[in-house]
Image: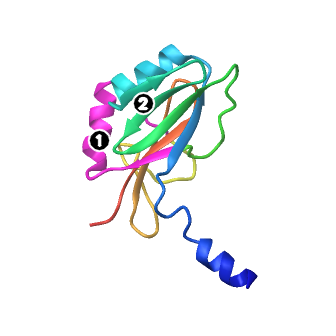
Amino acid sequence: MRHRQVRANKDMLQSSDLMAFVATANADLAREFYRDVLGLTLIDEHAFALVFDSNGTRLRVQKVHTVSPIPYTALGWRVEDIHASIRGLEDRGVSFERFEGLQQDDGGVWTTPDGVAVAWFKDPDGNLLSLSQEPK
């Protein structure tokens, strides 16, 4: 009976909306970056977080005293044209990361063995963010 109950609940979150989290120690810089640079819609702001809409997914930028960025991607967006997206973000002051050991093109794009194109950049708190484009 226990197996049946677990099986019935295994898709419990499948129909629920995903919410993403990242942290900031400077809400003013984070607000400007996520709203004005990345173009996300600010839908709420309170003492604990800035809340943005990213194409139907909520992003909570938590207000903290100190951010300890993780050494891997915290958030990423799938885009249709990675090079056009890079140019657009660079026009808004975003710098793309280079990583030793990865063969990246002039735009900072690395292509995975399965053909996904990926480029990385950081938010004002040093959180590593990415763009990716699926192979066509």
Farthest residue in the front direction? Answer: 1
Image position of 6 with respect to 118: above or below: below
| Residue topped by disc 1 | 85
User: Can residue 37 be spotted in the picture?
Assistant: yes
- In which quadrant is the N terminus drawn? bottom right
Q: In this view, does 23 lie to the left or right of 16?
A: right
In front of the other: 104 or 123: 123
- Residue 118 in picture, x, y percent from top left: 42, 52
Picture residue at 39% right of the left edge, 66% below the top: 115
Residue 80 lies in the magenta stretch: yes
Q: At x 53% / y 18%, what residue is drawn?
A: 27
Mark 1 and mark 2 lie on one chain; the one further toward the N terminus is: 1
Give the residue at x 51% y 45%: 19
Which residue, given by chain and number where applicable, does mark 2 sit on? 95
What amino acid type should be assigned to the residue bearing mark 1?
Answer: Ser
Q: Give the range drawn in magenta.
A: 75-97
Which quadrant would residue 56 be assigned to in this image? top left
Amino acid at the residue labelled 2: Ser
